[in-house]
Amino acid sequence: MADRGDMDDTLMRVHTNPRTLGTARERIALVTEAARRAGSYAANAPHRPVYPGREAIEALTAFDRPLPETGSPAREVLAELDAFGSPATVVSNGGRYFGFVNGGTDPAAQAAAILAGAWDQNAATPVMSPVADRLQAVTGQWILDALALPSYARVAFTTGASEANLTVFLAARDALYARQGWDVGLHGLAGAPALRVVVGEQAHASALRALRLAGFGAAQIERVPVDAQGAIDADAFPLVDSSTLVVLQAGNVNSGASDPFARIIPAAREAGAWVHVDGAFGLWAAASPSLAHLVDGVQLADSWATDAHKWLNSPYDSGILAVRDPEALERAMAMDSTYLPAGLGAAMGAGIRMSQSARAVPVWAMLASHGREGLAELVDRTCALAARMQSRLVEAGAIALNDVVLNQALVAFPSASGEPDDAMTDAVIARFQDDGIGWAGGTTWHGGRAMRLSVSDAATTEDDVDAVSAAIVAAWEAVR
Ligand SMILES: *Cc1c(COP(=O)(O)O)cnc(C)c1O
């Protein structure tokens, strides 16, 4: 295939301001140098300490200086950034980082982000960037296809699941008020009829914050009891109506468990409620034929939020929302402008941002390079690695705290009596983090302390899991 984007630099015009822009040759050399450093960083990720050492963190004081009066050549700026910045990174993409649900770095997505950075497109409307607009549309369809969501749903790219949740809550709120005969756009929230919000007891903290930002106070929110894995108990789910926003979850951030969608969603929607699913990572179970049963019925909801920067290993920050009724979203996000051609399908008409980067581009590259099979393989493999991690630790005497159904494993460490011991668990986590061989954080689970291990980096191998589980066991032996 002819590479029409890659022009010979000798054909390019020379910029007249060599100080800031440089000649064409210098520009190519600079960006190539940045890409070379990026490639070197990525290739060496497995050999770096997972968490930067004290020296690297202290060296960051190199950045502590006032705004310079005069600038420096871009090459030197880049070299300084690499020299002091790269060693002080947390290496979440070298295969041995199991913290939070922080994804690794997909090679195709990273490379696409480098090129898209050079494009510097404003993806707000088609007229600002035909390529961003087309790739948003295509990637949106691919995501709906991969997740088996309705093909007519409106997809938009966001900074993360937090923004995706918030955006959808605003659309759902306006739609639910409209069902009560109340026009929020005209009358605002004061004096509006009451809406109900129903969430699981283990809804993600960021979803609760998004609800608050959308105008739903804590006292308004009905919390439904959950089972031992943190999934909503369908038998305890209340009767809802057309004034109710239901927020379900695919993938509990600690256990990976999903709410029983098939048992809840049909009746709730039949009653006129708006059902949203926060599936920041867990929604991707739907992309695996062997795991899709975990989120059975999730496709029946009104809206979904998920992330590309977690399990898809796309670069930060990258989230996705999908709404079954495109007009409900576009009505809530509408604005009048004399100079901005919103146009049907414009990204700025489906979210709270106007100017925005072309976040779909790296996601497109990731999906193009993996395909349906590669995506399923990524999901399956990371889940199997999470199970392997928990097994290794349990074989050594740790206590399993969750059923590993997805890519999340929870363990506690016992005291001499064999009971889970909060102080011991925290001590093991701290010691393991200090050792720099891997990284995992802690959480509170059913009132006790737990180590949580999330396999969200496609680079992780069985060897990584074996080495890291051995290091955790060594940390336990050291603090015992
Ligand atoms: C991570 C997460 C969020 C927040 O997503 P961000 O992309 O970090 O904003 C929301 N819900 C769940 C279940 C999550 O795991």
Image (cartoon, rainbow, N blue to C red):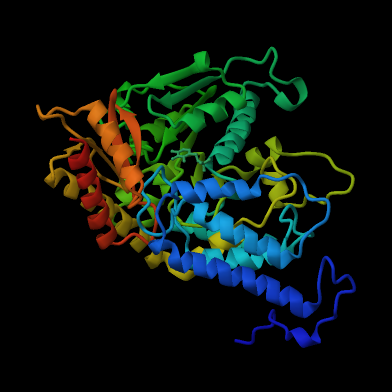
The quarter of the picture where residue 49 lies is: bottom left
**Lateral position of residue 465 relative to residue 102, left or right:** left
Vertical arrangement, residue 80 with respect to residue 321, above or below: below
- Which residue is drawn at the image coordinates 62% and 45% (left, top)? 326
- Residue under the point 24% across and 43% down: 475
Above or below, 253 against 238 in this view is below
Q: Which residue is at the front of the view, 253 or 337? A: 253
Left/right placement of residue 59 relative to residue 3 reads: left
Q: Quadrant of residue 250?
A: top left
- Whether residue 272 is visible, yes or no, is no
Most distant residue in the left direction: 417
- Residue 468's x, y, as percent? 27, 52
Q: Residue at 70% across / 51% down in the picture?
A: 356
Quadrant location, the N terminus: bottom right
In the displayed structure, does residue 9 sit left or right of residue 69? left
Q: Position of residue 436 (x, y in %)?
A: 35, 50
Towards the viewer: 252 or 135 = 252
Front residue of 439/407: it is 439
